[in-house]
Image (cartoon, grey):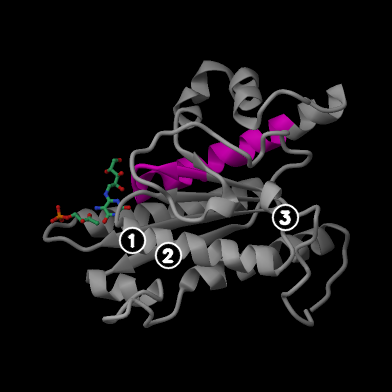
């Protein structure tokens, strides 16, 4: 692939779900992810952001988001669009009571950047017209910091396997934006906000956004038997 910039076109739909633990780290990672998506040409209105309490919830959330996007886009193509009905409204109606969990979670406008305190809050902007197609890629973002028990190991292992399972089961790329940290400092460095000025390290969110765009483009090519670099 000649370069990432520009390959995420106006028809690329990305879903992001982030945990709310370790908020400064998550906020920076989310900002970095959005920056990379937009730099590559993905439109803000085609990015849907959801939050969940903690990283353990990430596999379930991406799985349900993808299923919801498939249902939503199928219904939209049948009815010729669901104008006037917001994404989550229609997802709720279509998926019924079994998915009430996600519909109550916080949603943030992609252009608004970092997650704010006090989720849940009402949706605005992103996805209000409904998805015209299922997500091309999903990005799961979380920051696990090791404590003094085995909790960290169990969650890290479960989430890693869960996210892999979702992408292989659904065929939708799921970008692994889970930091498994021994210290908070490691997280600040990997979010690019370490040091006294808060600008040290490398923001891995930028890599995740770029990976999502690349996988979305390659996924489309592979589906048609086109193998380009
Ligand atoms: N300790 C951290 C958690 N813990 C919460 C779990 O992920 C989960 O939400 C809870 O067990 C309910 O199922 N989550 C993180 O993302 N980061 C942590 O450091
Ligand atoms: C990520 C974790 O599981 C961790 O923060 C939990 O801490 P602890 O093992 O001290 O309960």
Helix or strand or loop: what does disc 1 sit on? helix
Q: Residue 154 appears at what percent x and percent y?
A: 27, 54
Q: Quadrant of ligand 2?
A: bottom left
Left or right: residue 104 compared with residue 117? right
Residue at x-position 81% and y-position 63%: 222
Mark 1 Cα within 10 Å, few/some/many (few <14, many 20+)? some
Q: Which mark is residue 24?
A: 1
Q: Is residue 173 magenta?
A: no
Labels 1 and 2 touching (C-beta < 8 A): yes
Dominant SS in magenta:
helix
Residue at x-position 74% and y-position 23%: 84
Which comes before the other along the chain, label 2 or label 3?
2
Query: Can residue 182 be spotted in the picture?
Result: no
On the image, which quarter does residue 197 sit in? bottom left
Mark 2, residue position: 28
Which comes before the other along the chain, label 1 or label 3?
1
Left or right: residue 86 compared with residue 205? right
Q: Nearer the viewer, residue 93 or 46?
A: 46
Mark 3 Cα within 10 Å, few/some/many (few <14, many 20+)? some
Quadrant for the C terminus in the image = bottom right
Q: Nearer the viewer, residue 4 or 179?
A: 4
Q: Nearer the viewer, residue 67 or 209?
A: 209
Numbered range of the magenta stretch:
50-72
Residue at x-position 16% and y-position 60%: 147
Quick check: is the Cβ at mark 2 less than 8 Å away from ligand 1? no
Mark 3, residue position: 43
Query: Can residue 48 be spotted in the picture?
Result: yes
């Amino acid at each position: 692939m000649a370069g990432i910039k520009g390959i995420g076109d106006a028809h690329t739909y990305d879903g992001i779900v982030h945990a709310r633990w370790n908020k400064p780290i998550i906020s920076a990672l989310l900002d970095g992810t959005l920056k990379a998506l937009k730099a590559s040409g993905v439109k803000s209105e085609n990015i849907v952001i959801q939050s969940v309490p903690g990283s353990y919830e990430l596999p379930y959330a991406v799985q349900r988001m993808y299923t919801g996007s498939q249902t939503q886009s199928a219904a939209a193509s049948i009815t010729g669009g669901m104008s006037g009905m917001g994404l989550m409204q229609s997802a709720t109606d279509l998926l019924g009571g079994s998915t009430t969990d996600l519909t109550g979670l916080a949603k943030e406008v992609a252009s608004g950047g970092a997650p704010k305190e006090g989720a849940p809050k009402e949706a605005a902007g992103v996805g209000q017209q409904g998805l015209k197609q299922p997500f091309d890629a999903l990005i799961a973002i979380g920051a696990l910091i090791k404590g003094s028990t085995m909790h960290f190991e169990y969650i890290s292992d479960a989430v890693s396997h869960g996210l892999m399972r979702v992408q292989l089961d659904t065929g939708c790329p799921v970008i692994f934006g889970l930091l498994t940290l021994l210290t908070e400092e490691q997280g600040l460095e990997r979010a690019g906000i370490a040091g006294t000025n808060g600008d040290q390290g490398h923001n891995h969110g930028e890599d995740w956004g770029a990976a999502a765009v690349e996988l979305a483009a390659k996924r489309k090519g592979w589906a048609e038997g086109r193998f380009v670099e």
